[in-house]
Image: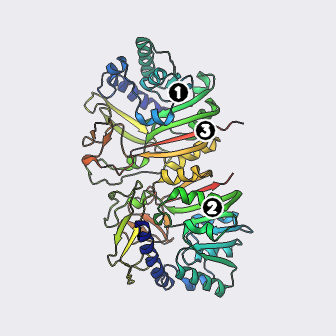
């Protein structure tokens, strides 16, 4: 059953890779000219990455992985979509930025990748595609060197709970918030990066509440530094959310009282 | 008077007045307590209960001490703190009446180090306390300072998501400006709706001031104070009842969101240890 869900999601992400490559949202042309795809939150919070070994989990087609490499990290990106990894390698070669890309799911990664890293990074819409956060946290712990930093910036569960914002601009909770063990099924049309893209697919994603996320990280012995929250979104949740001059998406009227993103930093204690 | 003195004076006047109303309320059921009924909620009983026997316990923002005295019944050596003189006087009276050993101190939370010097095995606080605090970083430092090394901090509280709910709507809508901390508190004018424990009661206090605290702010304040979080738990229910159209209280005395009985987070708990 799990394999069926993953296979469906793989079909979606392979299809999305093709349309994302030419999307304005991902701005691959700008990246080729030297722009960084990273956002100010992770750049400021993760700080100086020069000379650090960085593992990027669920890297899609590698723009952020390559951007960390441009900032001086020795970067490795992992994704379960073979099309995304092929494109990531192609882009790395074209812009001549050294980075390693590994084609693997998270749970199978220990069979595909050796070594330890100073930083494990993941961001923006990654963990909803994972059924098992204890397994995920175990993989993070497996790859962190003692004293190493785990950093994530993700979509806030509060925002994930809201009903369709176009149908309910008054902000109505739809849920669910708590994990149920079974994924939610979505009929996907287009993409968050391009609502009009010719993509039609069924996908499955898993709800993870804060308690589950934090307990998964604590459960492998990581020590939390902070949980930060932000009122801006990296992608529109609805057609009514517009991109502001700062590059983030906000609710209509510029409302900034709803959390759309959060970040967590945690350290693997030295023995 | 500075703004912060004005906020404190208004909230203190409210709580001095609420103490007498609550003493008579069915919600607090003082008669039942005196007869031996359990006043602690199922969450804190299950999660903190096993740690309590034989330990010293500091209860912050204890109101008139029912929970403090309940922990004494479970075997803790208890100290309760509240800023209301009326609440502390009632707490002492109830301790004398039940014969339960307990110390009650009247003090502003942030001024507690001026009057209390000892350290505790457990610091406990619960249900509706954080909205009255302007400074969570200072609160967390104070908790860390009152714990012995290896001591446990435990909180069971309304979930910050729950506090964003529109208290007038009959479906779960998000109100404005109730999640992120803001520089100034919300000022709630007295609209005649009484007390959460007795909506029919006449309350004279004209205004109360409440502060937003997001989940990230709470967690980060505790971490920054040097406490090590052992868990964050979240629950689709809370103890007690609130007179909001979107909430429903079941036969189990737990309150849930109508139509989202299993999937809206109404409360959370955190257990943290001072290394």
> Which secondary structure, mark 2?
helix
Q: Residue furthest right?
A: B54
Chain at numbered mark 1? A
Disc 1 or 3, which lies upstream in sequence? 1
Residue B47 badge: 2
Q: CA distance from mark 3 to mark 2?
A: 27 Å
Residue at mark 1: A49
Same subunit under labels 1 and 3? yes
Depicted A260 relative to depicted A84: above or below: below
Residue A33 sits above or below residue B26 on the image: above
Q: Nearer the viewer, residue B35 or A76?
A: A76
The answer to whether residue A166 of the structure is visible from this angle is no
How far, Cα to Cα, is label 1 from label 3?
A: 15 Å
The residue nearer to you, when weighing A225 against B128, is: A225
Quarter placement of the N terminus of chain B:
bottom left
Q: Are marks 3 and 2 in contact (CB under 8 Å)?
A: no
Nearer the camera: disc 1 or disc 2: 1
Instruction: Determine which residue is flagged by label 3.
Output: A267
Q: Position of residue A79 (x, y in %)?
A: 48, 26
Number of residue marks: 3
Q: Say which residue appears at 30% left-offset and 49% top-offset.
A: A255
Residue A145 coordinates in the image, percent (x, y): 64, 30
């Amino acid at each position: 059953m799990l394999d069926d869900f993953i296979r469906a999601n793989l079909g979606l992400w392979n299809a999305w890779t093709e349309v994302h490559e030419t999307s304005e949202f991902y701005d691959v042309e700008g990246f080729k000219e030297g722009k960084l795809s990273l956002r100010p939150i992770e750049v400021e919070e993760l700080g100086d990455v020069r000379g650090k070994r960085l593992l990027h989990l669920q890297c899609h087609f590698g723009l952020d992985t390559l951007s960390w490499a441009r900032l001086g990290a020795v970067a490795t990106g992992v994704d379960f979509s073979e099309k995304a990894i092929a494109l990531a390698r192609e882009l790395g070669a074209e812009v001549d930025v050294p980075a390693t890309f590994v084609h693997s799911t998270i749970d199978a990664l220990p069979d595909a990748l050796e070594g330890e890293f100073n930083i494990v990074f993941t961001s923006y819409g990654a963990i909803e595609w994972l059924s098992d956060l204890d397994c995920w946290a175990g993989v993070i712990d497996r790859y962190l060197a003692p004293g190493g930093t785990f950093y994530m910036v993700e979509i806030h569960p509060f925002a994930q709970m809201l009903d369709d914002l176009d149908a309910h601009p008054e902000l109505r909770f739809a849920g669910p918030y708590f994990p149920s063990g079974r994924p939610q099924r979505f009929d996907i049309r287009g993409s968050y990066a391009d609502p009009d893209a010719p993509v039609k697919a069924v996908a499955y994603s898993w709800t993870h509440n804060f308690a589950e996320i934090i307990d998964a990280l604590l459960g492998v012995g990581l020590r939390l530094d902070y949980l930060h929250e932000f009122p801006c979104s990296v992608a529109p949740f609805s057609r009514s959310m517009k991109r502001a001059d700062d590059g983030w998406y906000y609710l209509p009227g510029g409302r900034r009282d709803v959390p759309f993103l959060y970040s967590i930093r945690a350290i693997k204690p030295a023995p | 008077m500075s703004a912060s003195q004005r906020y404190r004076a208004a909230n203190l006047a409210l709580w001095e007045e609420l103490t007498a109303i609550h003493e008579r309320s069915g919600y607090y059921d003082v008669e039942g307590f005196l007869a031996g009924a359990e006043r602690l909620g199922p969450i804190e009983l299950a999660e903190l209960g096993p740690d309590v026997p034989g330990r010293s316990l500091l209860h912050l923002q204890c109101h008139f001490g029912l929970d403090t005295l309940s922990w004494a019944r479970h075997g803790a050596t208890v100290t309760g703190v509240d800023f209301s003189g009326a609440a502390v006087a009632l707490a002492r009276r109830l301790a004398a009446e039940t014969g339960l050993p307990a110390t009650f101190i009247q003090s502003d939370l942030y001024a507690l180090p001026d009057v209390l010097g000892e350290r505790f095995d457990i610091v406990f606080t619960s249900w509706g306390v954080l909205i009255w605090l302007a400074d969570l970083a200072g609160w967390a430092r104070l908790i860390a300072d009152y714990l012995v090394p290896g001591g446990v901090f435990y909180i069971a509280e309304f979930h910050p998501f729950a506090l964003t709910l529109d208290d007038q709507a009959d479906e779960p809508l998000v109100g404005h400006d109730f999640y992120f901390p803001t520089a100034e508190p919300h000022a709630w004018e007295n609209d005649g709706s009484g007390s959460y424990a007795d909506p029919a009661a006449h309350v004279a206090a004209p205004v109360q001031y409440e502060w937003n605290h997001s989940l990230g702010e709470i967690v980060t304040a505790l971490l920054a104070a040097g406490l090590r979080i052992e868990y964050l738990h979240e629950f689709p229910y809370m103890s007690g009842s609130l007179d909001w159209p979107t909430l429903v209280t079941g036969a189990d005395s737990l309150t849930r969101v109508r139509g989202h009985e299993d999937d809206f987070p109404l409360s959370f708990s955190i257990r943290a240890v001072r290394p």
